[in-house]
Amino acid sequence: MNAIETPTHHTLPPALNGDASWYEASARQRIGGLLDAGSFIEFVGPGERETSPHLAIFDLPTQFDDGMVVGQGRLNGEVVLVAAQEGKFMGGAFGEVHGAKLTGLLRAAAVRRVPVLILFETGGVRLQEANAGELAIAEIMRAMINARLAGVPVVGLIGGRAGCYGGGSLIAGCCSGLAISELGRLSVSGPEVIETNRGIEEFDAADRPLIWRTMGGKHRYLLGAVEAFVDDAIPQFRDAAIRLIADAPALNLERLALVQSRLADRLARFGGCADATDVWRALGVDANVDVPDLEPEAFLALAQSLKEADHDVR
């Protein structure tokens, strides 16, 4: 599927107010608030009726965009390609058509040298399309690497209800930059998957504070797993996307060696920690500071002070 060849003008939902919640918004509402007003053109939209060929076998409903909205617009006056997952349809899970739309967008970006924004909201791969979904993840990652090697910034934004799990987290790890909100979650395995395979003693999937302090935006930012932490308002994500596109690093062997070195340092430093709170103490956070309870501005000030202290030590 070559998504770039079938543009359709699509009317987005009414604009949200200036401080609208990214967490509460739909995929199209996020696009509408993220891009310059009136600039979005959708590719392979609902009118194309590109639905999953697999779900009907299981007597499951389909959706005409298959839970993936892709298209072109402008961000701060510059042309960008954008993909947004709709978490309200099958938790934003990847299937054949869902994945093909993102693959096509990334392939087009490599040819056109246009930045890409991916609005993640996914629980991973659809069980009903397991093989097709897993293949889609591999194709997306290959297309993303080729786009980045061509010098294209690929920025991921995470803050939806479904989080960013499974294959979606692997794709996010290949992005040139990530922004996350406090309500966003990022992890290869979701809480239920960990509990099912390792037991409730390893991870209690019903313990919401545990989930957010382990997989939530604040912890991921303190670990250095994402480049930007933002408040839940859509304009905050827009500002972060503009910065991350401008600051996107080149993908080369030197960059890969640097990332690998950072991962090794992180493992050596925090590998023995049993809980996120242990990691925070190791980072230098005072035991009296309740990280989850900090307002975004206070949290960012704390994170900056920790970075400065760590730099001084090094």
Image (cartoon, grey):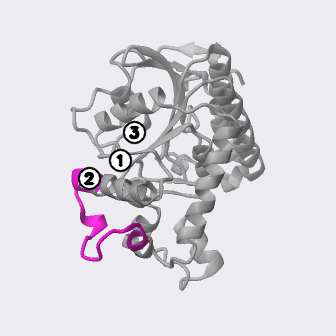
**Label drawn at residue 174:** none
Question: Disc 1 and disc 3: Cα gap in Å?
Answer: 8 Å
Quadrant for the N terminus, please: top right
Q: Is residue 175 left or right of residue 303?
A: right
Q: Are marks 2 and 1 in contact (CB under 8 Å)?
A: no
Residue at mark 3: 26
- Can you name the residue that lies furthest to the bottom here? 201
Indicate the secondary structure of the residue bearing disc 3: loop
What amino acid type is highlighted by mark number 3?
A: Ser
- In the picture shown, does residue 39 fall above or below 70? above
Q: Do we see residue 167 in this rendering?
A: no
Q: Is residue 284 magenta?
A: yes
Q: In this figure, what is the number of numbered marks? A: 3
Q: Seen in the image, is 142 located left or right of residue 310?
A: right
Which stretch is magenta?
280-300
Residue 165's x, y, as percent? 56, 55
Q: Which residue is mark 1?
A: 23
Instruction: Name the residue that disc number 2 marks.
Output: 301
Give the alpha-carbon distance from disc 2 to disc 1, as whole Å.
23 Å
Describe the element under mark 2 as helix, strand or loop. Answer: helix
Q: Position of residue 74 (x, y in %)?
A: 42, 17
Q: Secondary structure at mark 1?
A: loop
Q: Amino acid at mark 2?
A: Ala
Q: Position of residue 118 (x, y in %)?
A: 52, 35
| Sequence-first tag of 2 and 3 | 3
The kind of residue on which mark 1 rests is Tyr
Alpha-carbon span between mark 2 and mark 3:
30 Å
Mark 2 vs mark 3, foreground winner is 2
